[in-house]
Amino acid sequence: MEHLISKTLLISRVCEIMANEYKIPVSEAREKIYNSDLINLIEDDETGLYGESAWYAFSIYEQQNNSCSK
């Protein structure tokens, strides 16, 4: 698995952002991320998402899951 550290850090930061934005525990944010399509995009080296900012990745999550309420 290439870019493991970058992906791990990105996922962790996206979870922190989500927890803060949605006022939920980080564990719940992590569950939401790992059950979303975003995790597949991050894990796929072809997308290059692992090299983007956490806020950008979070915005993708929000676009994909616009029914989530804060």
Image (cartoon, helix red, strand yellow):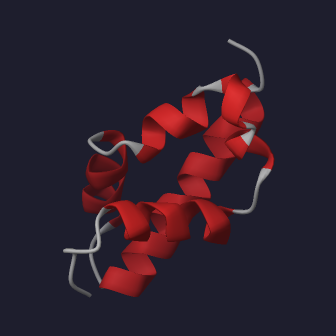
Percent across and percent down for residue 27 are 30, 56
Give me the residue at 60% from left, 26% from top.
44
The image shows residue 60, relative to residue 69, as above or below, that is above
Residue at point 26%, 41% (across, down): 35
Q: Is residue 30 left or right of residue 4?
A: left
- Name the residue at 27% across, 76% down: 24
Q: Position of residue 67 (x, y in %)?
A: 19, 74
Give the position of the C terminus as an image quadrant: bottom left
Q: Is residue 52 left or right of residue 30?
A: right
Q: Is residue 7 left or right of residue 20?
A: right
The image shows residue 1, relative to residue 13, as above or below, that is: above
- Which residue is at the far top? 1
| Residue 16, horizontal then vertical, whole percent | 50, 68
Q: How far from the left and from the top, in percent, is residue 40?
A: 46, 32
In the image, taking residue 40 as reference, residue 70 lies left or right, namely left
Q: Residue 2 falls in which quadrant of the image?
A: top right
Picture mark count: 0
Position of the N terminus by quadrant: top right
